[in-house]
Image: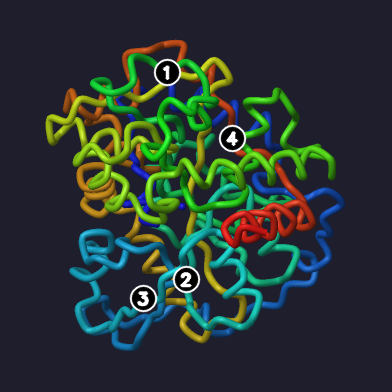
Amino acid sequence: MSIRSPRPRQLFALLPAVALLLAACSAQSGSPGASAGASSSAAASEAVNPSCAVSTTSPADMTGSLTVLDWAGYDAKDFWTDFATSYPKVNVGFEIGESDADIFSKRSTGDQADVFHPYTGWLQFYVDNNLVEPIDTSRLTNWDKVPDSFKKIGQVNGKQYFIPWDWGFSSILYRTDKVPSVDSWSVLFDPKYAKHISMWDDGPAAVTTSSYIHGWDETKITDAQLATIKQEWTDQQANINLTNWAGEPELTAAMASGDVWAAYAWQGAYATLLGQGVPVAYANPKEGRNSWVGVYGIRKGTANCDLAYRFLDQKLADKTSQNVVDLFYYGSANQNVMNGITDPTLKQAFSLDDPNILQHTNFTPNVTAAQRDAWTAMWAEVKAGN
């Protein structure tokens, strides 16, 4: 999601719309990120982590260290400022993941970060592999700021394993002075815009995009369909501007300069460019936009469990939540913050004045580990030209 400069994030002057979004997401996805035939045995056999005991030391006097596995950009203190202020003697370090696949790979191979930041579509995998602690939400003083429908996003097998934090859209961002209009994801394959197209460097996103264009169910992609997707993206690499983008800063720079005219993008890039006065629009394709939600989890067995709880709680605090809206243009799970959005640029970026936007939004579906691995491997072959 790299930063998702992160995946742009913002929203909530539209409380009713948010409730709709989350209800729709829960209804379509069931347990977010659930994989077919997922086992709940790991969750059923959880042992209590002794390091999760609540310390009686005052926040100002607490010491220790905490490591966070996150996306590039979220290591900036703006995005954990409430924790830094409340726990000044705790050392916080960051490891950076390049994608959901990379973060999951790191966690699966023994990464020791105490807290990590995945997105919907991947949550069940952490539970099935016993990589995440269940969360006692009674320890989160800011939990009541999160709408109930949003809380469900972080539940797997009926239990809270993650706290939701950021969310937003994926769609086509385009230069209106170069591209007259966009009504379909197929613009990313339009030869008229060769060398001026940019794609996010992510296999599942490539599969999703192609599935929208072909009208395929992305949760039931056949081997033949995947072969077709691989070939069309392999062919399209010749029309991509320089390379596939990994982080929003490089995408926004390329669009601002005029090198890129149309791109797969999060709404954060849209808001950034609007603020710079660049002539851009964010499409409502006939196939629908995509929507994603980011969450935080605590590593199973961490020796810094109590600090991890405190870190997650402060992620939901007002100033930190406000910063993700103001600086990254992403939505926040803190309802109080989202209720206060008045900036016209943010309203435009989130289509807050469009009452039908959620009816044309595709929510991140459940995929299996086999699908995830196949799509990631396919994309690696595409980039290698194989």
Q: How is the image coloured?
A: rainbow
Name the residue beneath numbered marker 1. Answer: 182
Task: Indicate which label's residue lies in the foreground, 3 or 1.
Answer: 1
- In percent of width and height, residue 239 lies at 47, 41
Q: Amino acid at mark 3?
A: Phe
- What mark, if any, has residue 115 been given in the picture? 2
Q: Nearer the viewer, residue 122 or 82?
A: 122
Q: Secondary structure at mark 4?
A: helix
Marks 2 & 4, CB-CB < 8 Å contact: no
Residue 128 location (% of width, % of height)? 75, 64
Circle 1 sits in a helix, a strand or a loop, which is it? loop
Percent x, y for residue 185? Answer: 53, 26
Q: Residues within 10 Å of mark 1 (few under 14, many from 20)?
A: many
- Specify the quadrant of the image occupied by residue 264: top left
Query: Which of labels 4 and 3 is toward the front?
Result: 4
Residue at 70% from the left image edge and 63% from the top image edge: 127
Q: Which mark is residue 205?
A: none
Q: In terms of sequence position, does the residue under pointer 4 or pointer 1 come before the other?
A: 1
Q: Which residue is mark 4?
A: 209
Residue marked by disc 3: 94
Q: Position of residue 191 (x, y in %)?
A: 48, 28
Label 4 is placed on what type of residue? Answer: Thr
- Give amino acid for label 1: Val
Q: Quadrant of residue 269?
A: top left
Report the residue that reaches farthest toward the top.
355
Closer to the chain start, of discs 2 and 4, is 2
